[in-house]
Image (tube, grey):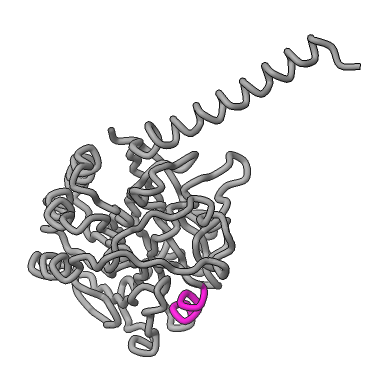
Amino acid sequence: MSTDGDYRSAARLAVGTVALGAATLGYAVGIERRHWTLRQAELPVLAPGARPLRVLHISDLHMMPSQKSKQRWVAALGELEPDLVVNTGDNLAHPQAVPYVLRALGSLLERPGVFVFGSNDYYAPKPKNPARYLMPRGKKKRIHGNHLPWRDLRAAFVEHGWLDLTHVRRTFDIDGQRIFAAGLDDPHLRRDRYNQIAGPADPAVLRIGVTHSPEPRVLDPFAADGYDLVLAGHTHGGQLRIPGIGALVTNCELDRSRARGASRWGAHMWLHVSAGLGTSPYAPARFACPPEATLLTLVPRPTPGERHQEDTPRKARSDIR
């Protein structure tokens, strides 16, 4: 038979559960999504004998004009003076965001840079049921918002000297070292046309592929064509992660264990997925997955006979507030 004590215990448990849920939601919405984080990793992807290269990977800004804290933090990344900036798309979340993206990128636009676009460069976000984020991808009906001024953003990037890699192959030099790069339009929107860049990657110190969404169907041909490294975004690192378990979803066909960070793809290629710096304004929460940019230090691949731990990138993390 139940007692008044049992009811009181159950009531306390219910109240405690609700309070914990509210506190977690408050942290995810009010604190963590503004906990700007610089991650660092070292990857052995350069040709033997090459000098190290420092690559800053930026993705998924989802910029709103009102996001002053994000704009200041991104602007401070210019102090890193990377050798190359790679932007993997989803810069915009508002039709008037272009000047704020450019202001945030600031001196980084004076560094060598390459870019592709994602779905939220082309289309504005729309209100959606948050539960859709956890649904299997095949059961989601794609909802597009209004068109965004991606052409204006592209023109500004190109004017500053950044290279648009959308369905093109490019070769350029950084401090006398030859870099080969190619990219795709957003696979999430099925705008990718790998046949337009297909073929063995040109000989270079570094051969990089760039895509917004890290779909396996595009990663496989990059690997087959001899690329050393592919950089992507889109996943937000899962956006909501459970400690000890990791990402619940990736919003693409990539497996959850690769939702953020560096991993091997095939025998010779590395993949780096950025958890990105933003969220949709209609789902402004992150949990156990702070917004991030990544500084990758690229070093030569080990030569045969060298002792190494090639399958494990050296990682570090620092927070810049």
Percent coordinates x, y for residue 33 in the rendering: 37, 39
Decide if residue 48 is on the left or right side of residue 17: left
**Residue segment shown in magenta:** 216-223
Q: Between 314 and 4, which is closer to the camera in this rendering?
A: 4
Percent coordinates x, y for residue 46 in the rendering: 36, 67
Residue 131 appears in view:
yes
Percent coordinates x, y for residue 44 in the rendering: 42, 61
Q: Is residue 7 above or below residue 309?
A: above
Q: Quadrant of residue 111?
A: bottom left
Task: Tell me, yes or no, whether the highlighted magenta stretch contains residue 220.
Answer: yes
Decide if residue 11 is on the left or right side of residue 242: right
Q: Between 311 and 319, which is closer to the camera in this rendering?
A: 319
Look at 44% across and 42% down and name the residue there.
Answer: 286
Percent coordinates x, y for residue 159 in the rendering: 8, 68
Look at 19% across and 72% down and name the residue there.
Answer: 163
Q: Between 101 and 47, which is closer to the camera in this rendering?
A: 101
Task: Tell me, yes or no, whether the highlighted magenta stretch contains residue 96.
Answer: no
Q: Quadrant of residue 273?
A: bottom left
Decide if residue 139 is on the left or right side of residue 314: right
Look at 48% across and 82% down and name the residue there.
Answer: 224
Residue 199 appears in view:
no
In this figure, what is the number of numbered marks?
0
Q: Main secondary structure of the magenta part?
A: helix
Look at 42% across and 42% down and name the residue there.
Answer: 285
Q: Is residue 266 above or below residue 169?
A: above
Q: Between 256 and 1, which is closer to the camera in this rendering?
A: 1
Decide if residue 305 is on the left or right side of residue 177: right
Q: Quadrant of the C terminus?
A: top left
